[in-house]
Amino acid sequence: MQARTSLLRLFTLLGVLVLPSFACAAEAEDADRVALVDKVENQAQVVSASGAATAIVGTPVHMKDELRTGAGARLQVIFRDDTVLTLGEHASVLIDRYVYDPDRGIGETVLQATKGAFRFATGRLKELKEKKIAISTPAADIGVRGTEFWGGPLDAQYGVLLLEGEITVSNQAGSVTLSGTGQGTDIPTPLDAPGAPSTWPAEKVARAIESVALH
């Protein structure tokens, strides 16, 4: 009986010592995580250098990962500063760079939206003193100043719609600034300058939002 009690004490002690080690190891392994999959509909993937993983709620996202969606799919991820990125179907976005260091007051989000439609809403990163938020698309680059907007193909051209805040849309042919809620710009081809800002009709806005809406 005494031997059994001693063994139980030994196992308990080992458990106390080993469990924190596993916890620390898990934290260390995921120290470079920049976002988590929050919602997913139909087929979506998180593609890293080690291969493609089916996206499910809770799947970690790291720098240089590519987010991909299939037919009829939606994928939403939340970054460490609560920035929210939502993808529509047949979309692809590369997490090129992400830094969030509130202690030092610096942050950076750089994404490459190479295909499909997306919706982007800046989180706490916009409150930092030194920050850079930029998204490149097939038609133009978008400079973000703490805002929410939509981008993607619509009506046989590329469109960008401002939902809140202010953004600059530019390519080699020209640049425009969207500063009013509901303002948008259309870009027929990457060789064309972004069109003059205009208030999109409610019907057009609805179609844009629906392309990334989660149901």
Image (cartoon, rainbow, N blue to C red):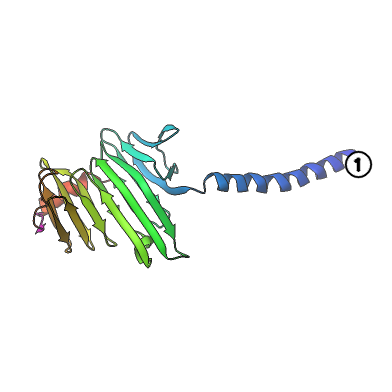
- The quadrant the C terminus occupies is top left
Q: Nearer the viewer, residue 89 or 187?
A: 187
x then y, percent, for residue 175: 15, 56
Q: Nearer the viewer, residue 72 or 184?
A: 184
Q: What is the chief secondary structure element of the magenta stretch?
A: loop
Local crowd size for mark 1, using a 10 Å CA cut-off: few (<14), some (14–19), many (≥20): few
Which span is picked out in magenta?
197-201
Residue 215 in sight here: no
Q: Residue at x 35, y 62 (%)?
A: 131
Instruction: Report which quarter residue 149 is drawn in.
Output: bottom left
x then y, percent, for residue 12: 77, 45
In the rendered image, the residue lying farthest to the front is: 172
Residue identified by numbered label 1: 2
Q: Residue at x 18, y 47 (%)?
A: 208
- The quadrant the N terminus occupies is top right
Q: What secondary structure is found at the residue carrying circle 1?
A: helix
Q: Residue at x 37, y 68 (%)?
A: 129
Q: Residue at x 45, y 63 (%)?
A: 102
Q: Nearer the viewer, residue 162 or 144?
A: 144
Q: Is residue 7 magenta?
A: no
Q: Is residue 140 above or below residue 103?
A: above
